[in-house]
Image (tube, rainbow, N blue to C red):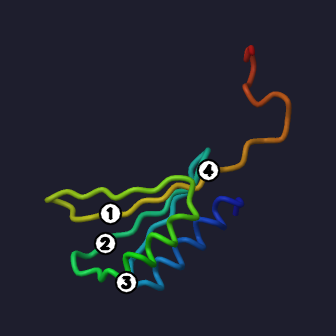
Amino acid sequence: MSASGVSAAAIAARLSAVGLPTRVEEHTRFTTVEAEVPETLSATSWREVLEVVADADRFGLLATSLNGRTLWAVVRKTVPPTGDVGGPGYQR
């Protein structure tokens, strides 16, 4: 598992401890965590959730009348430590 995968798994575990069911997906450049947020989440739990997702590179909340509320967090994978970060044909 990549370093971003480990960080995302830690975020997912902490969200699960708050009582939120989570999903973790590994992608090419990042790892995502999603959690369904019930309408009845207490203010104390919200504070815990915000502390948890603060460890991610990006996070947000998607709320729709059809699917409820989904919290998402993204942990980027590290950039390779080479001089060719831009790829072939990259010019400065």
Which of the two labelled residues, at mark 4 and mark 2, occupies the earlier sequence position?
Answer: 2
Which of the two labelled residues, at mark 1 and mark 3, occupies the earlier sequence position?
Answer: 3
Residue at figure coordinates x 72%, y 48% from the top left: 78
Which residue is identified by label 3? 44
In the image, is 82 to the left or to the right of 66?
right
The residues bearing labels 2 and 3 have C-alpha atoms spaced at a distance of 14 Å
Q: Are marks 4 and 1 in contact (CB under 8 Å)?
A: no
The residues bearing labels 1 and 2 have C-alpha atoms spaced at a distance of 6 Å
Q: Position of residue 52 (x, y in %)?
A: 52, 72
Of tags 4 and 3, the one toward the viewer is: 3
Query: Where does the C terminus fall, quadrant-wise?
Result: top right
Which residue is identified by label 2? 37
Q: Position of residue 84 (x, y in %)?
A: 81, 28
Of tags 1 and 3, the one toward the viewer is: 3
- In the rendered structure, find residue 76 and report the number of the disc placed on it: 4
Dot 3 amino acid type: Thr
In the image, is 74 to the left or to the right of 18?
right
Q: Are marks 1 and 2 in contact (CB under 8 Å)?
A: yes
Which residue is identified by label 1? 70
Dot 4 amino acid type: Arg
Dot 1 amino acid type: Thr
The residues bearing labels 4 and 2 have C-alpha atoms spaced at a distance of 23 Å
Under circle 2, the secondary element is: strand
The residues bearing labels 4 and 1 have C-alpha atoms spaced at a distance of 19 Å
